[in-house]
Image: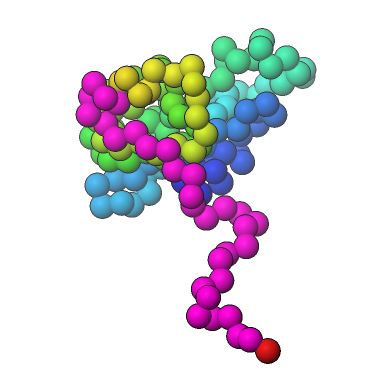
């Protein structure tokens, strides 16, 4: 999940940054992606100013991620936000068995799709975050 959050930092979208990572059957990272515009497309001046107008042009992180592997190659996808209905349908079609997400997306039918297709869909909010102070083990504390 932490790697998905790092991938989200690459998004040019000033309003919504979403990242995703795919793992294969040996738990190796086979791709990272983020939401954005099509490769090699330079947004015209003012494109990012109107959030609603530009939304239909954005490629979701899951779409970009699935362009990096073939059906059946990825076992697990971690994404910073629960997939929207369309992205969840695509992840089902790619044979993904497990999907982890951090932020909820209530307008999604992802839960229903996961139940129907037997996909494990799990919210993960306890993971290492950049800038967070790691916990100190009590036995390592030294009293003075």
77 left or right of 4 in image: left
Q: Position of residue 57 (x, y in %)?
A: 57, 15
Our reading of the magenta stretch's main secondary structure is loop
Residue furthest to the bottom in view is: 144
Q: In this view, does 90 lie above or below 80?
A: above
Magenta span contains residue 105: no
Magenta span contains residue 116: yes
Q: In this view, does 3 lie above or below 137?
A: above
Residue 69 visible (yes or no) = no
**Where is the C terminus found, in terms of image quarters?**
bottom right
Residue at the spot x=33%, y=52% of the render?
A: 28
In depth, the one of 84 and 47 nearer the eye is: 84
Q: Position of residue 52 (x, y in %)?
A: 66, 12
In depth, the one of 46 and 96 nearer the eye is: 96
117 left or right of 55 in image: left
Q: Where is residue 135 in the image (x, y as percent from the top left)?
A: 56, 66
In depth, the one of 28 and 121 nearer the eye is: 121
Which of the colour schemes (rainbow, by chain, secondary structure, one colour) is used?
Answer: rainbow
Q: Tell me how many marks there are.
A: 0
8 left or right of 112 in image: right
Residue at the spot x=65%, y=31% of the render?
A: 12
The boundaries of the magenta stretch are 114-143
- Quarter of the rendering containing residue 109: top left
Residue 57 visible (yes or no) = yes
Residue at the spot x=23%, y=34% of the render?
A: 72
Q: Is residue 127 above or below residue 44?
A: below
Residue at the spot x=54%, y=29% of the render?
A: 35
Q: In this view, does 74 lie above or below 51?
A: below
Q: Where is residue 2 in the image (x, y as percent from the top left)?
A: 50, 49
């Amino acid at each position: 999940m932490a790697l998905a959050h790092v991938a989200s930092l690459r998004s040019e979208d000033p309003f919504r940054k979403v990242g995703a990572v795919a793992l294969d059957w040996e738990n190796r990272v086979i791709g990272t992606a983020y939401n954005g515009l099509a490769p090699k497309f330079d947004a015209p001046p003012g494109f990012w100013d109107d959030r609603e107008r530009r939304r239909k042009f954005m490629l979701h992180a899951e779409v970009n991620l699935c362009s990096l592997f073939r059906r059946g190659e990825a076992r697990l996808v971690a994404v910073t936000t629960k997939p929207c209905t369309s992205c969840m349908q695509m992840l089902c079609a790619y044979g993904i068995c497990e999907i982890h997400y951090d932020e909820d997306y209530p307008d999604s039918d992802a839960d229903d799709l996961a139940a129907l297709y037997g996909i494990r869909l799990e919210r993960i909010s306890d993971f290492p975050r950049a800038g967070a102070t790691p916990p100190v083990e009590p036995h390592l504390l030294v009293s003075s």
